Amino acid sequence: MPTQASHSSYRARSKRQPRRTLLWLRWAVPAVLLGIAVLALALIPKRPSASSGKDTTPDALPSIVSVNRAYVMYKDENAFLLDVRSPQEFEFVHIPRLGNNQVVNIPLEELFSRLDEIPRERDIVVICTTGHRSERARDLLLQAGFPRVTSVSGGIQAWIDNNLPVEGTFPN
């Protein structure tokens, strides 16, 4: 059993000399945390600023657009309009050529094998009869690496309901 003298000398010594093992924690923990923060910032990819003047990757289009927005994209913004209905449906009624822009008919079933007919550098607006097939076609094109693709809400039915130009009529 320790004597009182040896116990008191331990107390005196511990008050005079702080434990060296705890001193290094005072600077090591903040230093390690700072190092982790710097490393994390260094690993975050840098995004070019809009004011840099460099060509940046365009933002994705909304997944679905209204027929009126699709018409403006087709008429004024040189978007590629892709009709994924069957050739028979396309023959009955379709969106007419506007200037140099024309609607290209590639049925949904053939789309994967005809991807080379679709320009990657233009916005692609996909349309069908009601919007269901065009959504599937949009997803397929996005998965195939086309950067800017959207689907027309309501399809050619909504296009006609909004009195936008068409050639032909639906059979009775």
Image: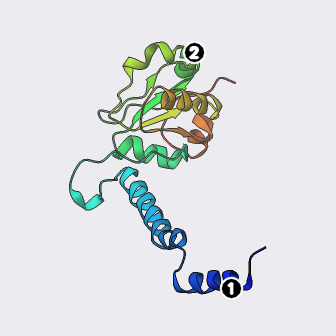
Inter-mark Cα distance, 1 to 2: 95 Å
Amino acid residing under circle 1: Ala
Amino acid residing under circle 2: Glu
Mark 2, residues whose alpha carbon is within 10 Å: few (<14), some, or many (≥20)? few
Q: Is 98 drawn above or below residue 31 in the view shown?
A: above
Q: Is 37 in front, or is 85? A: 37
User: Which residue lies under the disc numbered 2?
Assistant: 109
Q: Position of residue 167 (x, y in %)?
A: 49, 29
Q: Is 166 in front, or is 113? A: 113
Q: Is 5 drawn above or below residue 54 in the view shown?
A: below
| Residue at the image position 53 percent from the left and 86 percent from the top | 16
Q: Position of residue 155 (x, y in %)?
A: 59, 36
Q: Earlier in the sequence, mark 1 or mark 2?
A: 1
Q: Is 55 drawn above or below residue 29 in the view shown?
A: above
> Where on the picture, by quarter, is residue 73?
top left
Q: Which mark is residue 5?
A: 1
Q: Which mark is residue 19?
A: none
Name the front one of labels 1 and 2: 1
Q: Dot 2 lies on which element?
A: helix
- Please identify the quadrant where the C terminus is shown: top right
Whether residue 132 sits left or right of residue 93 in the image: it is right
| Residue at the image position 34 percent from the left and 53 percent from the top | 47
Mark 1, residues whose alpha carbon is within 10 Å: few (<14), some, or many (≥20)? few
In the image as oriented, which residue stretches furthest toward the left?
53
| Residue at the image position 79 percent from the left and 73 percent from the top | 1
Counting the numbered discs, the total is 2
Q: Dot 1 lies on which element?
A: helix
Q: Is 9 in front, or is 22? A: 9
Q: How is the image coloured?
A: rainbow
> Where on the picture, by quarter, is residue 163?
top right
